[in-house]
Image (cartoon, rainbow, N blue to C red):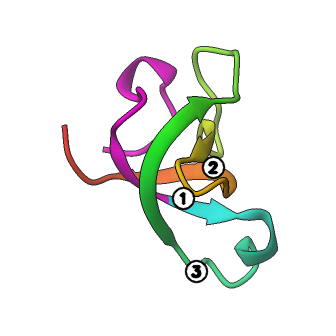
Amino acid sequence: MNGQNRKDIYPGLEVHIILKKDQRSGIKTKGIVKDLLTNSAYHPHGIKVRLTDGQIGRVCDILQK
């Protein structure tokens, strides 16, 4: 699953995100979704979320469904 559709992402979901500072390198950060920050139903670069540890980035992989 990619993280482009808002309907696939919800609080408590385990995901990989790419932080703004890691966009060039593509380094992924693993975490649990706390809040969804993108309001649109679809985003080509991934839905922006806040993790439980406060980090913000775009979802690139959904690890559990």
Quickly name the residue at label 3: 27
Q: Upstream in the sequence, badge 2 or badge 3?
A: 3
Q: Is residue 11 above or below residue 16?
A: above
| Residue type beneath disc 3 | Ile
Q: Upstream in the sequence, badge 1 or badge 2?
A: 1
Query: Residues at badges 1 and 2 in contact (C-beta under 8 Å)?
Result: yes
Residue shown at 65% from the left, 46% from the top: 45
Query: Quadrant location of the C terminus?
Result: top left
Circle 3 packing at 10 Å, graded few (<14), some (14-19), many (20+), is few
Circle 1 packing at 10 Å, graded few (<14), some (14-19), many (20+), is many
Which x, y percent locates residue 53?
57, 57
Quickly name the residue at label 2: 58
Determine which of the numbered discs, if any, sits on residue 17 in the image: 1
Determine which of the numbered discs, if any, sits on residue 35 in the image: none
Q: Quadrant of residue 23?
A: bottom right
| Residue type beneath disc 2 | Arg
Residue 53 part of the magenta-drawn span? no
The residues colored magenta run 1-16
Which element type, helix, strand or loop, lies under badge 2?
Answer: strand
Q: Quadrant of residue 42?
A: top right
| Residue type beneath disc 1 | Ile
Circle 2 packing at 10 Å, graded few (<14), some (14-19), many (20+), is many
